[in-house]
Image (tube, rainbow, N blue to C red):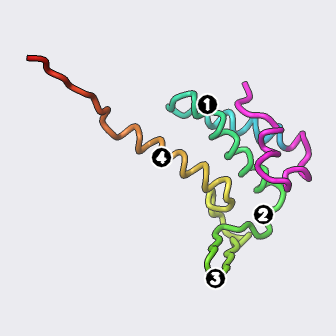
Amino acid sequence: MLLTTIERIRLLDSGFDAVSDARLEMCIEDASLEVSSLEINEAHYERLTRYLAAHLAILSTELKQAVIREKVDVIERQYSDPNKNIGLMASKYGQEYQRLLDDLAELEKEPKKHLNLMVL
């Protein structure tokens, strides 16, 4: 079962227009397998799959120098070293995937807040 679509990945960035449908489909399949094995609410599957598939597509096509950090004030751009294996940090989509996972893990840790009322 695929958890996102080629069209949704192409909406992330016009750069994905240059990636073939077959390659994106393969990345979606891989990401779908990975995300569906996570123990999280299924409501988050599509978004996680979209960002992980985009990350995999970037890695498979253009990891010559992926931007790993950008700064707005006093413009700065840091590129990854293509000879280093930096995993999810190699692309902004991998970074977003990791951020989402971290946020979901944090939500799971927090105790559920309940409102307790007592009527006398």
**Location of the C terminus (image quadrant):** top left
Q: Which residue is mark 1?
A: 36
Name the secondary structure under disc 3.
Answer: loop
* Membership of 16 in magenta stretch: yes
Marks 2, 4: nearer the viewer: 4
Magenta range is 1-23
Residue lying farthest front? 120
Estimate the spatial distance between the alpha carbons at disc 4 and disc 3, rounded to whole Å. 29 Å
Inspect the image, locate mark 4, and give the three-letter code of the amino acid beneath it.
Answer: Asp
Residue positioned 76% across, 70% down in the render: 65
Image mark for residue 63: 2
Between label 4 and label 3, give the one nearer the viewer.
Answer: 3
Say which amino acid is labelled 2.
Answer: Leu
Determine crowd level at label 1: few under 14, some 14-19, many 20+ residues with C-alpha closer than 10 A. Answer: some
Mark 2 to mark 4 CA distance (whole Å): 27 Å
Amino acid type assigned to the residue bearing label 1 in the image: Ser
Q: Which residue is mark 4?
A: 103
